[in-house]
Image (tube, rainbow, N blue to C red):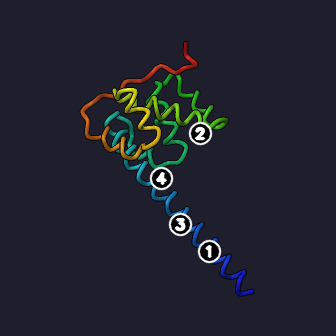
């Protein structure tokens, strides 16, 4: 009985910590996208709405014509989201190396993009040949 309560306590602590990190990550990413959306002349509040903020980011990255390719995110989220993040950095006139870095550390790179005076340029989607 006592041993079971201890194990459950550890699970609760671990779950709480993971939830805290997830909320912190979402908040930081949303604040960065809030500023980037504003720079791109998009309504910045959209960055705080889960899925819709990601859809808007995708639309800004690939242009309005290719916005529905975002649905690929539902079928292969990790792979496609990595590709979209790479192209998001490229859309802000970043180098290939920086864009690869953005895939792994988007919070740090997002802050760097905010302080650069570069324009958003929609990118060509790989399905749009």
Which residue lies under the disc numbered 3? 17
Question: Looking at the image, is mark 4 or mark 2 earlier in the sequence?
Answer: 4
The extreme bottom residue here reads 2
State the residue in front, 44 or 18: 18
Per the image, label 4 sits on a secondary structure element best described as: helix
Mark 1 against mark 2, which lies toward the viewer? 1
Say which label, 1 or 3, has the lower sequence index: 1
- Dot 1: what SS? helix
Q: Nearer the viewer, mark 4 or mark 2?
A: 2
Where 115 falls versus 67 (above or below)? below
The vertical placement of 74 against 67, above or below, is: below
Residue neighbourhood size for the residue with mark 2, other residues' Cα within 10 Å, grouped as few (<14), some (14–19), many (≥20): few
* 127 relative to 13, above or below: above
- The image's mark for residue 26 is 4
Of marks 1 and 3, the one in the foreground? 1
Which x, y percent locates residue 29? 43, 48
- As drawn, is 57 to the left or to the right of 8? left
Residue 10 - label: 1
């Amino acid at each position: 009985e006592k041993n079971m309560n201890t194990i459950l306590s550890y699970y609760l602590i671990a779950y709480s910590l993971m939830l805290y990190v997830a909320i912190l990550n979402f908040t930081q990413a949303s604040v960065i996208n809030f500023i980037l959306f504003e720079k791109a002349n998009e309504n910045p509040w959209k960055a705080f709405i889960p899925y819709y903020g990601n859809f808007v980011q995708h639309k800004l990255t690939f242009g309005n014509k290719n916005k529905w390719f975002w649905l690929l995110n539902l079928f292969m989220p990790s792979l496609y989201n990595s590709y979209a993040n790479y192209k998001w950095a490229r859309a802000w006139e970043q180098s290939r190396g920086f864009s690869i870095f953005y895939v792994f550390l988007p919070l740090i790179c997002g802050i760097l993009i905010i302080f650069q005076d570069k324009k958003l340029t929609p990118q060509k989607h790989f399905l749009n040949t």
